[in-house]
Amino acid sequence: MKKVRETKTPYRTARAEIPLGDEPQREIRTHGLRLERDSQLSPSEGNKPITVPPNVVEELNEIAKWEGLSVEQVVGEAVFHYASQVRRRKIDAEAEAYKRKHPRLRAKYLGQYIAMHNGRVVDCDRDLSLLYNRVRKRFGRIPVLMRLVEEVAERVLVFRSPRLEPME
């Protein structure tokens, strides 16, 4: 027998099927996606199961209990943080490509904003907002580096602050 619970999360309404009794939880349902063994999710298959090994399910249940959250909230937070890390690594890789290619970029795009995706310039414009709109329309939420091409690859920023010492 399963108890069904719906909760509101910061991400969207979630629905969870929670097995009752001693049987370990093997399935977690969140809005538009079902988590089960040995499968993957693609955007066109919103309700297709996703693999969740039993030890991960146990870990999710423990964390939810410790934090006083629902399993759906824990999964939502974990996916959100993982996606943030992936996006950050992608932008860091694009920034490294920008530094390597800066001499050529400076010669061709000085004073313009460029959009870099997979180490290549995919668009440019003197107006950042126009560039941004085109890039978002073309790439959606995929991380794309957009920056102004200047004389130097990186600016050095110096922050001055007073040093406080204890009074004697």
Image (cartoon, rainbow, N blue to C red):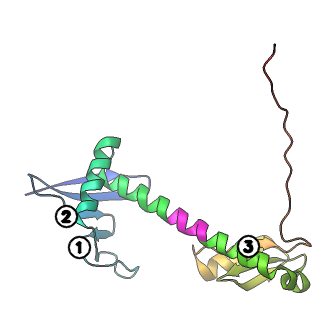
Judge whether residue 68 can be spotted in this image. Answer: no
The answer to whether 66 is drawn above or below residue 79 in the figure is above
Q: Which residue is mark 1?
A: 37
> Picture coordinates of residue 48 (x, y %)?
29, 77
> Which kind of residue does numbered mark 1 sit on?
Arg
The residues bearing labels 3 and 1 have C-alpha atoms spaced at a distance of 39 Å
Q: Secondary structure at mark 2?
A: loop
The answer to whether 69 is drawn above or below residue 153 in the figure is above
- Which quadrant holds the C terminus? top right
The residues bearing labels 2 and 1 have C-alpha atoms spaced at a distance of 8 Å
Q: Main secondary structure of the magenta part?
A: helix
Q: Which residue is mark 2?
A: 26
> Picture coordinates of residue 138 (x, y %)?
62, 83
Residue at the farthest top position = 168
Magenta extent = 83-89
Q: Are marks 2 and 1 in contact (CB under 8 Å)?
A: yes
